[in-house]
Image: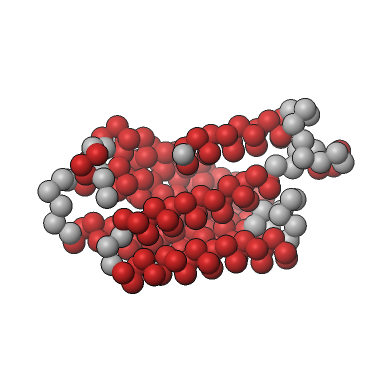
Amino acid sequence: MIIIYTFFTELLGVLIKYNNNFQFFSDDRYTWHNVIIYNIYQLVFFLFFFEVYRKVLDKRINKKMIFYFNIVCTLSYIVNAIAYNPLHNQTTYAHIIGSLMLVFIIVQYLKEKYTEGNSQPLKFNLLFWISIGLLVFYLSFPLILFIYMLKVDLWILAYFRPILLISIALMYAFIIFGLLMGKRKAFR
């Protein structure tokens, strides 16, 4: 489901930005604004993966923590949307909070995976590879967002764009590898 949702979000984002027939706003200054769909997408993405990890983690304390992370993440998006118009501005603060929480959850998941005695090797576990891919991306994403928020010189931002693109490519490479290698018995 999340793959399909990601695909259609990206498709809609491209259509809004480059095709005048797809617009949210009639004002010509904002016809290319598509940030709202990415703000909504990011919240749904975080809540989806928080729930996935809540279901697969064994420790009760981790499950409870994720429950509270869901609340904090949702509230951070609401507060960020009140402070900065999400129709025209990225919900950067909320993205950073959600990213840091997701990284923490993934680390907890990886700790559990390495300590449990599973008969299936991790290389066949799809969620393990998804976790590695998400970790690669979300370790750099908050830093890049923070630097973007500082509105530093353009030449500095030019150095971070390749890092962002490489982390995106690596994330999808790990996920694809997991899809190819994964076995149902090893999932968890």
Where residue 63 sits, quadrant-wise, is: bottom left
Instruction: Using residue 67 as the reference point, say whether residue 9 is left or right of it.
Output: right
The number of callouts visible is 0
Percent coordinates x, y for residue 111 in the rendering: 26, 62
Residue in the image at 81% along x and 41% along y: 25
Of the pair 72 and 168, the residue shown nearer to us: 72
- The answer to whether residue 188 is above or below residue 169 is below
Residue in the image at 66% along x and 66% along y: 79
Percent coordinates x, y for residue 51 in the rendering: 42, 56
Residue in the image at 41% along x and 69% along y: 65
Q: Decide if residue 186 is in sight here.
A: yes
Where residue 172 sits, quadrant-wise, is: top left
Percent coordinates x, y for residue 185 in the rendering: 20, 42
Percent coordinates x, y for residue 78 in the rendering: 65, 63
Q: Decide if residue 152 is in sight here.
A: no
Colouring used for the render: secondary structure
Instruction: Using residue 38 as the reference point, say whether residue 166 is left or right of it.
Output: left
Of the pair 162 and 5, the residue shown nearer to us: 5
Residue in the image at 21% along x and 44% along y: 186
Instruction: Using residue 167 as the reference point, say whether residue 152 is left or right of it.
Output: right
Of the pair 41 and 51, the residue shown nearer to us: 51
Instruction: Using residue 135 as the reference point, say whether residue 34 is left or right of it.
Output: right
